Image: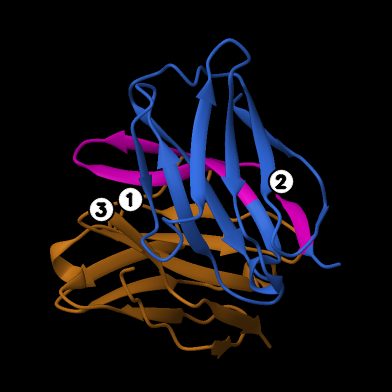
Amino acid sequence: SYELTQPPSVSVSPGQTASITCSGDKLGDKYACWYQQKPGQSPLLVIYRDTKRPSGIPERFSGSNSGNTATLTISGTQAADEADYFCQAWDTTTAGFGGGTKLTVL
Amino acid sequence: QVQLQESGPGLVKPSETLSLTCTVSGDSVSSGRYFWSWIRQPPGKGLEWVGYILYSGSTNYNPSLKSRVTISLDTSKNQFSLKLSSVTAADTAVYYCARETLAAGTRYFDYWGQGTLVTVSS
């Protein structure tokens, strides 16, 4: 399957900007998605097609994708944003997920 | 509102076959815009795509699981199902069913079931 690499953890202070990266071979040539997962819950789509936000997702969530790296950015991070975040992309016929990044809001 | 609900045994013995069903409401599994998918997550670990089925019955599986996986569709019950044979402890995971939407040249998992924990143990 398509391998995507994320940092295991990222810490941020409330109100600051958090950036979570996702690396994969020629990832910029594909579309990346991002999912938020809180403990005991199913994943929730927060970014699709690199930069698009589904209805109901706050504007503070944004995404970018270029080269071999996609980035999820959370501006003005809130305590409610503390969660695991997974990137995902398709490589021809196989879906790959990143290993996940635990975002801690200190 | 689209909802997906997994059902099936929570405990399976090693070497046996894991069987799960996903019941869809608020949408039709006969719709041509969607991939009806299974994704799993071992306890405390990341997500792994298992495979999907289209309305036509066409399937695509994770190469690492392909020899053991079968996904099928029951349009009369608006359900799709997963069978994973010859299970081992490594197959212990929360199994999610999900709808993947194909739109504007991209695709994304926009609706997920609540997940069901399947433990492989004797």
Check if residue A11 falls in the magenta segment.
no
In the image, are marks 3 and 2 on the same chain?
Answer: no
Residue B21, located in which quarter of the rendered image? top right
Residue, disc 3? A93
Q: What residue type is labelled 3?
A: Thr
Q: For the residues carrying marks 3 and 1, which lies nearer the camera in this image?
A: 3
* Label 2: element kind: loop
Q: Mark 3 lies on which chain?
A: A
Main secondary structure found in the magenta portion: strand
Chain shown in blue: B
Residue A58 makes an appearance in the image: no
Quarter of the image containing the C terminus of chain B? bottom right
In the rendered view, does B71 fall on the left or right side of A41?
left
In the image, are marks 1 and 2 on the same chain?
Answer: no
Gap between marks 3 and 2, in whole Å? 26 Å
Q: For the residues carrying marks 3 and 2, which lies nearer the camera in this image?
A: 3
Q: Which chain carries label 1?
A: A
Front residue (pair B53, B83): B83
In the rendered view, does B64 fall on the left or right side of B90?
left
Q: What residue type is labelled 2?
A: Gln
Gap between marks 3 and 1, in whole Å? 22 Å
User: Disc number at residue A52?
Assistant: 1
What shade does chain A have? orange
Give the residues drawn in magenta, as a range. B96-119
- Display coloring: by chain
* Label 1: element kind: loop
The mark nearer the N terminus, 3 or 1, is 1
Residue, disc 2? B114
What residue do we see at 64% from left, 66% from top? Answer: B91
Front residue (pair A27, B29): B29
Q: What residue type is labelled 1?
A: Lys
What residue do we see at 19% from left, 61% from top? Answer: A30
